[in-house]
Image: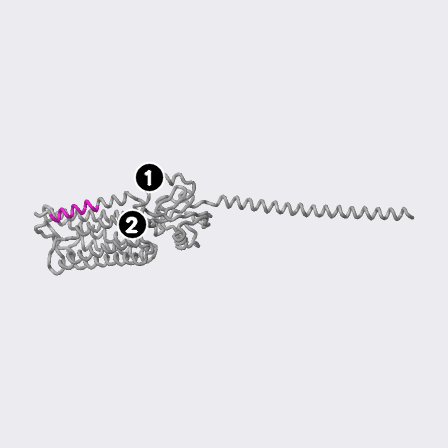
């Protein structure tokens, strides 16, 4: 038996598994990193099951590995689509959410004909490289389905590349777009078109998808969320801050918070991480305008928005914000400091009320003083008249 493709698949599984954990450990709170981890892990299991099929000792074992291979193939397709939509910022739109839901739902539907029947893949066959999948009469259905998902991924990445105003996001989406087109073209030709035409070539998908994962991991390391300060250092810094602190990425999703945010707003940490920052502001606040102002000025001070607590209560805050950049000078996101002004405003209100009361008392005293002065003037005038009258009477 030739172990060439077995070795390729094993190497791919090791590479994908390492990249998955490397990216996740560097910043486990980032939703993009989490999606990469699940994607790369699914690829690693895909490669492992493909390797198992190559060296299976009998047909039944090879059949089992084939079904698992198809399952992991159908898993990492919608995971990468989810990543692309998250990267683009379209996840906040109805269209983006629908695309993600349909991606996962369609993958679950395709599991039945692809992994549980012989409609897509016929019984496994043996070659010099070990067992491989036999092509079923509805194989083209899976090929078309996979091509549709890849096209959706490419369209979203191209959209992100074209419309993004941030160099980091633009470069990230362009490299992924180019790598996806290259891998998709080769995979479609060797694993869809040739088998459908009756020409068998042992699957190159494990090799190409492993190369794609390497490029993907590089993109995450170079442009993704890996360059944020290590978690322990960040937590130590955050713990010493007296005010609320939030770090948001370039898509305005929350990556880091300190305990003051949780205490003041009533959220658990899990509820805040990967939440869009607009969910914390009052509904009349324009987050895009605020973020654009921060980008333009690089920092802002003493803004006076209102934050919305989990129970819906609004609290006034004083906001300072600064753009954060990596060692290449590219934008990572934004550090925002909030100071709760509720107590200050309460004291101002008390002071105002006290001042108003004092002013009213002073006005009343002045009124009484005027009345007193008027009485004294009348008494003096009356005394003068009495004296004048006395003088007249005395003269007579």
**Left or right: 86 as drawn, with respect to 141:** right
| Residue that label 1 marks | 232
The residues colored magenta run 4-16
Q: Position of residue 42 (x, y in %)?
A: 22, 48
Query: Which label's residue is closer to the chain start, 2 or 1?
Result: 2
Q: How is the image coloured?
A: one colour
Is 6 part of what is drawn in magenta?
yes
Pick out the residue farthest to the right. Answer: 396
Distance between mark 2 and mark 1 Cα atoms: 21 Å
- Badge 2 marks a residue whose secondary structure is helix
What residue appears at the point 33 percent right and 50 percent down from the top-left corner?
A: 330
Is 105 part of what is drawn in magenta?
no
- Badge 1 marks a residue whose secondary structure is helix
> Overall secondary structure of the magenta stretch?
helix
What residue appears at the point 29 percent right and 49 percent down from the top-left corner?
A: 224
**Left or right: 230 as drawn, with respect to 192:** right
Would you say residue 86 is visible in this rendering? no
Neighbourhood count class around disc 2 (C-alpha, 10 Å): few under 14, some 14–19, many 20 upward: many
Neighbourhood count class around disc 1 (C-alpha, 10 Å): few under 14, some 14–19, many 20 upward: few
| Residue that label 2 marks | 223
Q: Position of residue 98 (x, y in %)?
A: 30, 57
**Left or right: 262 as drawn, with respect to 176:** right
Q: Quadrant of residue 148?
A: bottom left
Decide: marks 2, 1 in contact (CB < 8 A)? no
């Amino acid at each position: 038996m030739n172990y060439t493709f077995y070795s390729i698949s094993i190497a791919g599984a090791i590479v994908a598994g390492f990249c998955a954990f490397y990216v996740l450990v560097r910043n486990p709170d980032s939703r993009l990193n989490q999606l990469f981890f699940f994607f790369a892990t699914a690829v690693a299991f895909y490669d492992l099951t493909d390797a198992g099929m190559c060296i299976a000792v009998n047909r039944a074992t090879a059949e089992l590995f084939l079904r698992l291979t198809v399952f992991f193939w159908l898993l990492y397709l919608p995971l990468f689509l989810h990543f692309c939509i998250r990267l683009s910022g379209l996840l906040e739109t109805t269209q983006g959410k629908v695309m993600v839901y349909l991606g996962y739902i369609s993958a679950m539907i395709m599991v039945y004909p692809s992994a549980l029947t012989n409609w897509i893949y016929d019984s496994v066959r043996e070659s010099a490289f070990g067992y491989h999948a036999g092509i079923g009469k509805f194989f083209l259905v899976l090929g078309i389905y996979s091509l549709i998902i890849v096209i959706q991924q490419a369209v979203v990445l191209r959209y992100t590349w074209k419309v993004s105003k941030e160099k980091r996001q633009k470069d990230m989406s362009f490299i992924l777009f180019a790598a996806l087109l290259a891998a998709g073209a080769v995979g479609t030709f060797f694993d869809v078109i040739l088998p459908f035409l009756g020409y068998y070539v042992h699957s190159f998908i494990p090799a190409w998808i492993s190369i794609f994962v390497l490029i993907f991991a590089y993109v995450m390391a170079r442009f993704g969320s890996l360059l944020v300060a290590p978690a322990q250092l960040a937590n130590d810094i955050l713990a010493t801050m007296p005010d609320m602190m939030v770090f948001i990425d370039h898509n305005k999703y929350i990556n880091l918070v300190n305990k003051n945010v949780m205490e003041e707003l009533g959220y658990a940490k899990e509820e805040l991480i990967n939440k869009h920052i607009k969910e914390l502001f009052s509904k009349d606040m324009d987050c895009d305008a605020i973020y654009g102002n921060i980008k333009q000025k690089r920092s802002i001070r003493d803004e006076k928005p209102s934050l919305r607590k989990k129970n819906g209560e609004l609290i006034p805050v004083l906001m300072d914000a600064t753009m954060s950049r990596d060692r290449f000078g590219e934008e990572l996101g934004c550090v925002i400091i909030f100071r709760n002004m509720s107590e200050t405003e309460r004291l101002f209100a008390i002071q105002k009320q006290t001042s108003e009361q004092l002013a009213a008392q002073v006005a009343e005293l002045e009124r009484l003083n005027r009345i007193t002065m008027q009485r004294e003037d009348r008494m003096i005038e009356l005394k003068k008249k009495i004296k004048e009258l006395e003088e007249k009477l005395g003269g007579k």
